[in-house]
Image (tube, grey):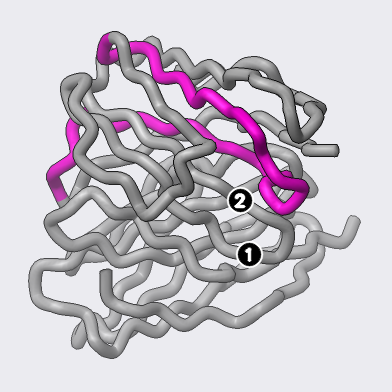
């Protein structure tokens, strides 16, 4: 138990569906992140939020839409995805975005399959 | 973040030590060395980090070369639960944790 909870753990969706991934952290952190991990590829940073404000969008297609209503919750809204978007989506949090010593805590991930 | 180089894979026997090397010849003077690991079907988890001195915690030890161009993560007694991908990452003063391919550790019973 890392203190970062992701739901659902598994999601299958069609290319015309709209779905959302949810992340909640119980660590009192101020920064939250979305990462994508495709098969046989390194983790890719997608979005960063610090104190609810988006500070990084790593050239992510608009079919992925993040939302951070408060420092404890982060959503990833999904619409009109492609099969190549199938991957493990990881949420993470840290005390804040700065700092070489900051530890980042990851959730267990949401496995997404687009059919 | 500066680049790191790790072997693709390593094997170990249960209850034996595992030494995981990492080369980071372009490390800057203020970069911290972090290690994370990712167990199958889980998100990465923090293992240990250090700057110059060797570090120990309940999970592992981190030995840092005097010139800081390399480091070694040491698992003192490998268990089956230690089978994972281990990532060596250099952190400068920003938030971007950049993961490479890591080292896949296999533990034989």
What is the span of residues highlighted in magenta in the rendered image?
A70-99
Q: The residue tagged with tag 2: helix, strand or loop?
A: strand
Which quadrant, please, contains the C terminus of chain B? Answer: bottom right
Q: Is residue A20 left or right of residue B94?
A: right
State the residue position of label 2.
Answer: A37
Q: Is residue B27 left or right of residue A1?
A: left
| Residue found 71% across the figure and 45% down from its top | A82
Q: Check if residue B54 falls in the magenta segment.
A: no
User: What residue is pinned by disc 1?
Assistant: A41
Q: Is residue B61 among what the camera can see?
A: yes
* Residue A115 to residue B54: above or below: above
Image vertical order of residue B50 relative to residue A87, above or below: below
Quadrant of residue B28 in the image? bottom left
A4 w.r.t. A32: above or below:
above
Q: Are marks 1 and 2 in contact (CB under 8 Å)?
A: yes
Q: Position of residue B7 (x, y in %)?
A: 60, 82
Q: Position of residue A106 (x, y in %)?
A: 48, 34
Question: From the image, which quarter does the N terminus of chain B lie in?
Answer: bottom left
Q: Quadrant of residue A56?
A: top left
The circle on residue B27 is: none
The answer for which chain carries disc 2 is A
């Amino acid at each position: 138990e890392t203190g970062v909870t992701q739901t659902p753990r598994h999601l299958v969706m069609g290319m015309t569906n709209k779905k959302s991934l949810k992340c909640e952290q119980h660590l009192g952190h101020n920064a939250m992140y979305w990462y994508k991990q495709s098969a046989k590829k390194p983790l890719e940073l997608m979005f960063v939020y610090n104190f609810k404000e988006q500070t990084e969008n790593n050239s992510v297609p608009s079919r992925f839409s993040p939302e951070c209503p408060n420092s404890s919750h982060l959503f990833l809204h999904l619409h009109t995805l492609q099969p190549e978007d199938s991957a493990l989506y990881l949420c993470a949090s840290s005390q804040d975005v700065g700092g070489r010593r900051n530890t980042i805590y990851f959730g267990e991930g949401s496995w997404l399959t687009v059919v | 973040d500066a680049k790191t180089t790790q072997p693709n894979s390593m094997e170990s026997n249960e209850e034996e030590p595992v030494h995981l090397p990492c080369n980071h010849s372009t490390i800057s003077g203020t970069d911290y060395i972090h290690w994370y690991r990712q167990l199958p079907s889980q998100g990465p988890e923090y293992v240990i980090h250090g700057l110059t001195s060797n570090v120990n915690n309940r999970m592992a030890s981190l030995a840092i070369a005097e010139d800081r161009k390399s480091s070694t993560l040491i698992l003192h007694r490998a268990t089956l639960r230690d089978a994972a991908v281990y990532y060596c990452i250099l952190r400068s003063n920003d938030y971007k944790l950049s993961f490479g391919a890591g080292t896949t550790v296999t533990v034989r019973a």
